[in-house]
Amino acid sequence: MANKILVTGGAGYIGSHTVVELYNAGYEVIIVDNFVNSNLEVINRINEITHQKPIVYPIDLLIKDDLEKVFSQHKFDGVIHFAGLKAVGESTQYPLKYYKENILSTINLCDLMNKYDVKNLVFSSSATVYSPENEMPVNEEGKLRPSNPYGRTKLFIEEILRDLYQADNDWRIVLLRYFNPVGAHESGLIGESPKGIPNNLMPFITNVATGNLKVLKVFGSDYDTVDGSGVRDYIHVTDLAKGHVKALQKNVNPGIRTYNMGTGNGYSVLEVIKAFEKATNRKISYEIVDRRPGDVAVSFADPTKAMEELHWKAEKNILEMCRDAWKWQSKNPNGYN
Ligand code: NAD
Ligand code: WQD
């Protein structure tokens, strides 16, 4: 019998790609998602790609009784926990909403994992937990100091999980700190479908390319970088999804382990625009504006630990990230809507 994995937030951007890779690796998948930031159509698309259909529970992790019904109906071998809110700007406006949604839902989940003896967890953390003072590339020992409430929910959850392991050494926990996930499944059937105007660079670029948006604003031209624009570690979402499968496969001994999920390469905003133009043969109109408050100049990973311990390495390059982001957006100009 295949290992059965509960994927919270499995209808979302990274979750849906991970569900595909879990099926490719032979797992059985159950999804819990309240669809605040996703669309049921993604399940048909997963089916089109994998010829498998996950059971989906459209429930909110904050409603513990509903979640308990799921645990009472299935014996899980592990949980990948993606569900949560992720908009940095919104988190500064509504911090309590973020603390409640992200932290309480994780506590509910872990309580039930304890009760039903499923002490095997992979958690979506973020590079945003690192202090901007770290030298780049940053490894897992880097100083931790997130600069917004969203990032603090991730750090606090990491700390809660560290406490949980200290209290009960039976747990197997992996914290994955993602850098900047972009791109889409190579089929163009699933991808990132932000609601409203995108905050992140790649979906903004793809929406300029379709004509949905007129012009990209490049935030800042006076950073201490190759060309003055901000530098990030973009990682293809399929590579990231495969990283989760590796993390599950290697999570056999009790412990709590942390891994950066990045390529180890930094690209500036202007370099990403050029790569997109090259990969897609489309022109992106852009204008340079002031820095965006809260942004750092440079952020990229030292992914050595994940290579050594998980035997995982991001394989797709920036051109493939752009090509697949565009394939998804051009086939689905309004995302899943
Ligand atoms: P996403 O919004 O596409 O996916 C999250 C999913 O969780 C959505 O389908 C949403 O409907 C669901 N959800 C939210 N609150 C829920 C709740 N209370 N109960 C049930 N379902 C709920 O986001 P994503 O980009 O796929 O991110 C997945 C995870 O990775 C998040 O925890 C996010 O913070 C983290 N992360 C994302 C990035 C990124 O750049 N995308 C970077 C670092 C970390
Ligand atoms: C990338 C670069 C911008 C938009 C965010 C979260 C982080 C993590 C990943 C969840 C920066 C520039 C962007 C635009 C631009 N999410 N940019 N014009 O800010 O690195 O990280 O997503 O954990 O927590 O903060 O990603 O895609 O917004 O920006 O010039 O319209 O593109 O200034 O240099 P960021 P991003």
Image: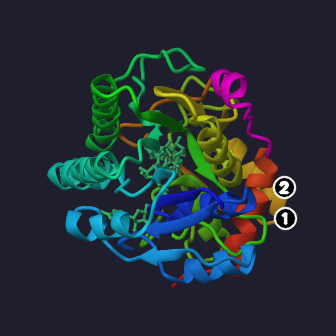
> Percent position (x, y) of residue 124?
46, 45
Queried on whether the Cβ of the residue with tag 2 lies below 8 angstroms from ligand 2, the answer reads: no
In this picture, residue 292 sits left or right of residue 64: right
Q: Where the N terminus falls, by quadrant? A: bottom right
The answer to whether residue 35 is above or below residue 159 is below
The answer to whether residue 128 is above or below residue 274 is above
Quarter of the view holding residue 331? bottom right
Residue at (61, 57) in percent of width and height: 18
How many numbered marks, from 0 up? Answer: 2
Residue reaching furthest to the left = 96
In this picture, residue 89 sits left or right of residue 250: left
Q: CA distance from mark 1 to mark 2?
A: 6 Å
Camera sees residue 180: yes
Q: Amino acid at mark 1?
A: Asn
- Within 10 Å of disc 1 (Cα), the crowding (few <14, some 14-19, many 20+) is few
Q: Secondary structure at mark 2?
A: helix
In this picture, residue 130 sits left or right of residue 114: right
Residue reaching furthest to the front = 1
Camera sees residue 334: no
Magenta extent: 304-316
User: Which residue is tagged 2?
Assistant: 278
> Percent position (x, y) of residue 133?
42, 17
Q: Nearer the viewer, residue 58 or 78?
A: 78
Residue 314 located within the stretch drawn in magenta: yes
Residue at (61, 83) in percent of width and height: 44
Q: Nearer the viewer, residue 326 or 66?
A: 66
Which mark, by number, is residue 281?
1
Residue at (78, 65) in percent of width and height: 186
> Percent position (x, y) of residue 220?
50, 39
> Label 2 near label 1: C-beta < 8 Å?
yes
